[in-house]
Image (cartoon, helix red, strand yellow):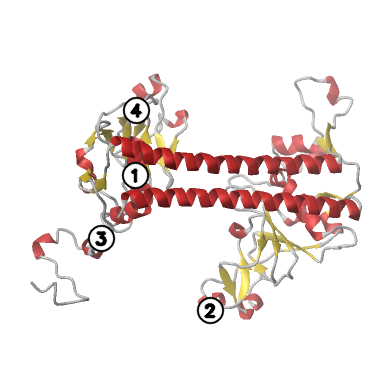
Amino acid sequence: MHSGTYNFIKFISYKALSLWDVKRYVKNQISFHNSVKLKEVLTPSIEPISKEEILSNNWQIISKINFAGKLYLRDKSETNTFKGNLNKVDSDSLIYSKINVRHGCIYYHPINSIPFAVSSEYPVYKIDSFKVLGDYLVMVIQSNGFKSILNKKATGISKARVKPTDFLETEIPIPTLSIQKELLRRYNDCIYEAQELEQKAIQIEEGIKHYTIDILGATTKQALTEQEGKYKYWNLVHFIDVAEWGVDIIQKKQKKDIFKYPIVKIKDICLLGSGGTPSRSCPQYYKGSIPWIKTGEVLNEEIFETKEHITEDAIANSSARLYPKGSLIIAMYGQGDTRGRTAKLGIDATTNQACAVLHNIDNNIVSTDYLWYYLQGRYDDLRSLASGNNQPNLNAGKINNYDVVVPPMNVQNEMVAHIKEQKALVKQLRQKATSIREDALKEFENEIFE
């Protein structure tokens, strides 16, 4: 009665308030044609399975589904130690993560795929293949529009979940099977084109590595003493070489890269510094204008902007230091692929303590860009120097004593020009691939949402 009178107040019938959650009662701005509820095309499948059955069939247990809908399975050795009840996921089934389905964590197990097991956190559904294609269903649920719908259905505080009953009551656009197939075909054609561009970028990157090796004349020799060479299966190591225990480290010390140009240590061509993290207990430190870099921002690119900025007082009261434009950064530690990555400062900036900063580079010996590209090319070698158990780290000593091959300046300049041109092409290909993927997804969503 009142709803048409007020512009900013929404009236909800008291009996409709089964849960108090504002987002549930905000009008949904998304609509579509040919809608049906998910319960009309999905049937809950609960098929308990024992660890013994999993082991006897050589199956696996789910680890997670990521936001892109990719399935990860646990190692088979973890089956016996898994705690909790498990259900079987057959082929042509759909599962989702109760906690993260609103972020896109949904997976379709294709026809003729090997079964696997899931906990109760992953409801299992058989698909009515006469009405909907599994690949189409996943794409719809992973779309931005649909994720916003599911987000309104999540309940709970610390780990909000979408309950199976609410999930099945959700409406979804389902055109005819022929239209579904056509939408998928057009989308997959675009994805294939993007993948070809990405593959071409990878080939160019491999070409850069081979080019660098050819120019520098790198070969690898196994350094074996006469005594060590007598043994085929035993590897004798001098005690003096075992400063750090680790088979890969010892093996690395016994191999030597041979180059046709002189080699210098990093400490001989520049100064090495690090940074610091101003106290988080003083929020004012992070309200300045001085760029402050973390290892997650070290991505083999030139840095012109940072996520966080600090003040002069933050520098004065921490080990952070302002480094000049043109300095090079090496990530000494960090999760995943971060360790060993590099960046070049396109601005004056500070860093946290996880970054090693090469500054005051002697450009009479080595050009800054050559040194940068050289370090990028030695990424795997740099990472192999790291030590530590849970999260191996590089340190200032190892970086300072790292070998750099130094060809004549004209060769350096030639290499820089070639590599810069190839890297620009790689960037262009990857940007085009990203654009194609984004446009394909937009076209798909425009077809199903009004």
Query: CA gap, disc 4 to disc 1?
Result: 18 Å
Which residue position is annotated with label 1?
A: 97
N-terminal of the pair, mark 2 or mark 3, is: 3
Which residue position is annotated with label 4?
A: 91
The image's mark for residue 201 is none
**143 up-or-down from 292: above or below:** above
N-terminal of the pair, mark 4 or mark 1, is: 4
In terms of secondary structure, where does tag 2 sit? helix
Where on the picture, by quarter, is residue 126?
top left
In terms of secondary structure, where does tag 4 sit? loop
Which residue position is annotated with label 2?
A: 284
Tell me if label 2 and label 3 are in contact, CB under 8 Å: no
Amino acid type of disc 4?
Answer: Ser
Amino acid type of disc 2?
Answer: Gln
Tell me if label 4 and label 1 are in contact, CB under 8 Å: no
Please give the name of the residue rendered at 74% of the width and 57% of the height, measured from the top-left corner.
Answer: 396
Tell me if label 2 and label 1 are in contact, CB under 8 Å: no
Q: Position of residue 198 (x, y in %)?
A: 59, 43
Q: Nearer the viewer, residue 299 or 231?
A: 299
Query: CA gap, disc 2 to disc 1?
Result: 39 Å
- The mark lying in front, picked from 3 and 1, is 3
N-terminal of the pair, mark 2 or mark 1, is: 1
N-terminal of the pair, mark 4 or mark 3, is: 3
In terms of secondary structure, where does tag 1 sit? loop
Please give the name of the residue rendered at 13% of the width and 72% of the height, measured from the top-left corner.
Answer: 3
